[in-house]
Amino acid sequence: MSEEKSSSEVQEERKVYFGERLREFQRRALEDPEGFWSEIAENLVWFKRWEKVLVWDPPFAKWFVGGVINASYNCLDVNLKNGNKNKVAYFWEGEEGITRTLTYYQLWREVNKFANVLKKLGVKKGDRVSIYLPMIPELPIAMLACARIGALHSVVFSGFSASALADRINDAEAKILITADAFYRRGKLIQLKKSADEAVKQTKSIEKVVVVKRVGLEDTPMTEGRDLWWHELMKDAEPYCPPVPVDATDPLFILYTSGTTGKPKGVVHSSGGYLVWVWATMKWAFDPKPDDIWWSTADIGWITGHSYTVYAPLMHGVTQVMYDGAPDYPKPDRWWEIIEKYGVTEFYTAPTAIRMHMRFGEEWVNKHDLSTLRILGTVGEPIDPEAWRWYYKVVGKERCPIIDTWWQTETGGFMISPAPGIELVPLKPNFSVSYGLPGVHAEVVNDEGKPTKPYERGYLVILAPWPGMLMTLWRDPERYKRVYWTKFKPNEELEFKIKPPAIYYTGDYAMKDEEGYIKFMGRADEVIKVAGHRIGTIELESAFIEHPAVSEAAVIGKPHEIKGESIVAFVTLKEGCEPSEDLRKELRMWIRKRIGPVATPEAIYFVSKLPKTRSGKIMRRLLKAVVSGAKLGDISTLEDASSIQEAIKAVEELKKAMGEEKKS
Ligand code: WTA
């Protein structure tokens, strides 16, 4: 490719490379969005058809305006009528080996009963219900029961701490909290109810706490008048609850995610557009067939579980596996054993898990017959070509395409991924997400917002609204505008058939190759991905600063061979506080307690000052270079050059100390 080509010429060339059928889908979604989306939306059951497919008042989009729908009806009642009534919805397995099976009919019954329980507890349309449960069937049951009566669920990952839960309950002003007594992880008992109790102490809105007996813990603390057992409430619940018709533009749920400030963002998804999007994207990317067994390993506490363990697969009437346990317990082949046992055909997981299994060695995989697999998927962070090839060869035996799906909590569903449900384009391990799905008008731009040349790193932006996009941030439309829609302004070089009045900024680095295939290169903002979990550095820094000994903190992600990134913190202490090994341990525990075990820092470095610009901004870029041993680059904007020398020294000293510890 010659250097002289203008970016619009480059764009012209790129268009040529789309697969024929895929390109046709893209073209229709672009030129006739009304017709295109109407046709897709007709696959769902609407109580009233929409009047207008899209009302776009940038950056606020309303999809399927005038349409009336119910999510639980589409996931359950529809399957009772179309021949799936006695089909298995979930094969559930607990870490300790117990199993449960729920058919669509059984799931429908449980959801109806629990919806009636919620009604009895005073939950109404528009109310918020917080759910803090491990991966047990009661989790989708509770979510679908909320959806049935038009209440919003706010699921909080069961690995989050009490204070993270309290923050989310308070922001959503949830009335009800649903939790469990305890669960197992790697054989260890995790007392969830205890964390829930601690959280509720810090909140005002919770009226009742519903507790699922997951383990049957003898001494579960129950507060009189506030705490109720799930199974007791269900005993006398009425068996049928009519689905409440909601507007397509009514919110379906809130899901909190980390951003670039300390306060988690309450991402709000709609009832119409979101459902249409997850339905369509699952069809395009995984093309589920009636006898497929789908297993997505993500916890329902994250968006992946919401969209692809609850809403999309149930709407497609798919049979799923749901597993509540660690991937390597009691042995490293637990997952492969599960795939063999249930005959999983479509398997969806994260690069961090793939890398972990790579380390265990292929003999663990080869012990099992995985010949039922036909499609493999991945999500959560960039997959490196080495892991891609291992997954393709060792797990898929070179028979299964690797569907690398790029998306975000905010996008509701897959955005950029191969689409065998339409047309499978040739896959490239290094540009593994391939192209945008129909309706996703993605571009890679430079700092000026102009399209980049092939192999030039830039930011991924989306140029037009899509049905699955977030509606707003819970009670914070200004933040929604600021975070996603202000970084780039439309410009003429973004030559595009729909003149974009506003541009969605994803926060991700990406590049294209000369065929327009996309490669993701990690976050461009202050968000870290630890084992696929999204954690905000500022959130971590605020948690550090809350500790009485800490004055300032700078947190960065350090490349990690399994987890993708790990958390590293540089900390300055208050006058009179001395660095020590005990304090380091205490701070690690402090962060686990404030945020959760996923956020445990790998290293904490004590320094007397942080590298800052003259205007006082912490130069995380330099600290990143220090911990990864990269070149420092330009340090002319540093206010005090000795700060960086000190950081280098701190890293070296800790490395040395750890080396010595290992030796002894
Ligand atoms: C990253 C998870 C590369 C990305 C569904 C994004 C990915 C963030 C991929 C969203 C992928 C997700 N390749 N990076 N296939 N999928 N990401 O909200 O940085 O937990 O912005 O949603 O994960 O994380 P979230």
Image (cartoon, helix red, strand yellow):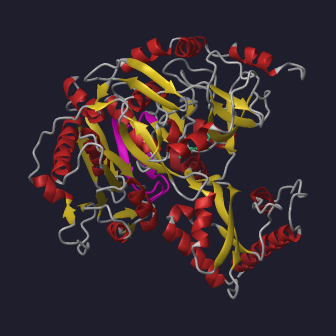
**Residue 375 seen by the camera:** yes
Would you say residue 304 sits in the magenta stretch? no
Q: What residue sits 60% from the left and 70% below the top? A: 544
Tell me: residue 287, above or below residue 511: above
User: Is 446 placed above or below 136 here?
Assistant: above
Viewer can see residue 40 = no
Q: Is residue 569 left or right of residue 272?
A: right
In which quadrant of the rendered view does residue 13 lie?
top right
Q: Quadrant of residue 18?
A: top right
Magenta residues span 319-346
| Quadrant where the N terminus is found in the figure | top right
Is residue 399 toward the left or the right of residue 182 in the image? right
Left or right: 323 in relation to 211: right
Relative to residue 111, is residue 554 depicted above or below? below
| Ligand 1's quadrant | top right
Q: Return the residue nearer the eye: 293 or 236.
A: 236
Q: Residue at x 73, y 25 (%)?
A: 491
Q: Position of residue 659 (x, y in %)?
A: 74, 75
**Image quarter of the C terminus:** bottom right
Q: Position of residue 251 (x, y in %)?
A: 37, 38
Looking at the rendered structure, the number of numbered marks drawn on it comes to 0
Please say if 501 is above or below 27. Answer: below
Q: Position of residue 199 (x, y in %)?
A: 38, 67
**Pick the front one: 248 or 325:** 248
Which residue ends up furthest to the bottom in the rendered image?
576
